Amino acid sequence: MQFKNEFLEIKKSKPFYKIDDKTYMIFQDKTAVNFNSCNCYLIKNDNKTVVIDPGCSRNNLIQTLKEIKVEIKDVKSIILTHSHSDHYVLVNYLKEKAQSEVYIHHSDSELLEDTSKYFDSLFDRSFIKSRPKFKELYQILEYFSNQEKYEVSETNFYLNPAIKSVFDTWNIYSIKADHEFKDNNTLPGNLKVIHLPGHTAGHCGLLHPDHSIIFSADIDFNKRGPVVSSKYANINNYKKSINKLIRIVRNHKIKHLFPGHWNPIFSNLETSLKQFYREFEIRQEKILEILAQKEKMTVDEITAETYKEFIKNFVDLIDDTTKDSLLVAEAAELMTNRNYLTELERLKLVKQVFLKNQEYWKLA
Ligand SMILES: [Zn+2]
C-alpha cells in the first residue's frame, strides 16, 4: 500500500511520478487532446533521453523535463508501444524540437503510416456501411480516408456536432517510423521488447533495464475490461499475451507494472493480471447468456443487449464531451462483439448461420 498511497498523493499535485533516479511517469491528462491521452514514460540517459508513448499533454511534458533537468533537444528516441493515436499525441512536436527517431513493432508500422488503414481499423468501413444508423460515421470515415491531412474543422459537409467532437479528439496523422523492432530486441534506454499482441497485432510491453518493472501499455487494467474493438484486435492473442505477461512477472520477479492508462499496479501483479483476463470470460459468458434466449441473433441484436449494460457501467464516466458521442461508442461496441463472436466460434461455443444473406449467430 505504501507505494500506492504515495503515488496517489503525488498524482494530485504533480504532472509526474519518479519511478527511480532515471525513470519517470508523466500522467495521462485530459488536456492532451481532450480526453484522448495516455501515460508517458521517460528514461533519462545522458543526452539521449528516451520517451515511451508521448501521449500526455505538451504542458506536462515541458514541466516534467524542466524539473528533471532534461533539455527537450536531448529526447532522441520515441518508442511507441503500438500505433494508436492516443499514444503518439506529441510525436510531431518532438520530431520538430529534437529530431527524435520513432521506434515501433514491425506489425504496427503500416497502421502508423497509413491513416486510411488506421480509420478502417477503428470502424471497419464495410461493416459500418451496411447499417443506416451509422450513416454519418461512415461518411466521415470515407471522407478522412481519402484525405492527406485530417482536420475536422476543414470538412466541407455538415457534420453532426456529436460525431465531430469525437473526431476532433483523435488527432490522427501519418508517422513514418525510423526503426521497426521485434520481440526480444533491445532498444535505446536498454529497454527490452515484450511482444504482447491482441489489442493490435504489434502491441508491445517493455521490460525496464533493471528488470524490476514492465511498461505494459494497453494491458492497462481498465475497469471496462481489455479494449478489443478495433478491426485488428484479436482476443485469442490478447489472452495469450496476458498469460505471457504472468509468466514473465513470475520468472523475473517483477515488482511493479506501469500501464499506458490509469494507475500502476504496485502489488499482487499476478492477481491483477488474472482479474483482467477474467474480464474476457465474463463477457463471453454474457454473450452466451444472451444467445441462449433465442434461436439465433444478429450481432446488432446482441449489441443492443450488451450496450444497455455498457451504458450502466459507463454512466459515471460520461461528461459533456463524451455524452454526445455515444453513437461512436455504440459502433465500437458492435465491433467488440464481432471480435468476441469470432473468439467464441474458435472455442466452438457459437456458430454462424446465414439466412437470406443475413448473418446470424447461435449457440453451437
Ligand atoms: Zn490502444
Image (cartoon, rainbow, N blue to C red):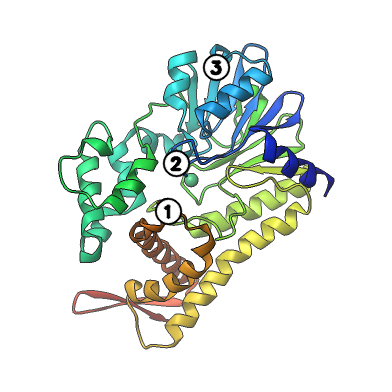
Mark 2 lies on residue: 34
* Foreground disc of the pair 2, 1: 1
Question: Is any part of residue 176 visible from this angle?
Answer: yes
Question: Which residue type carries mark 3?
Answer: Lys
Observer-side mark, 3 or 2, equals 2
Q: Residue at x 63, y 18 (%)?
A: 66
Residue 49 vertical position relative to residue 164 in the rendered view, above or below:
above
Q: Is residue 137 above or below residue 298?
A: above
SS at mark 2? Answer: loop
Residue drawn at x 32%, y 53% as measured from the top left: 123
- The foreground one among 174 and 240 is 174
Q: Is residue 25 left or right of residue 312?
A: right
User: Which residue is identified by label 3?
Assistant: 76
- Closer to the chain start, of discs 2 and 1, is 2
Residue drawn at point x = 69 percent, y = 36 percent: 13
Mark 1: which secondary structure?
helix
**Label 2 is placed on what type of residue?**
Asn
x, y percent for residue 279: 59, 65
Q: Residues within 10 Å of mark 1 (few under 14, many from 20)?
A: few
Type of the residue with mark 1 = Asp
Residue furthest toward the right? 2
Task: Please name the residue shown 40% across and 63% down the image.
Answer: 333
The answer to the question of whether label 2 and label 1 lie on touching residues, with beta carbons closer than 8 A, is no
The answer to which image quadrant residue 301 occupies is bottom left
Crowding at mark 3 (Cα within 10 Å: few <14, some 14-19, many 20+): many
Along the line of sight, the residue nearer the viewer: 306 or 314: 314
Residue beneath label 1, please?
Answer: 320
Going from N to C along the chain, the mark reached first, 3 or 1, is 3
Instruction: Determine crowd level at label 2: few under 14, some 14-19, many 20+ residues with C-alpha closer than 10 A.
Output: some
Task: Answer yes or no: disc 1 within 8 Å of ligand 1.
Answer: no
Q: Is mark 3 within 8 Å of ligand 1?
A: no
Residue closer to the observer: 243 or 294: 294
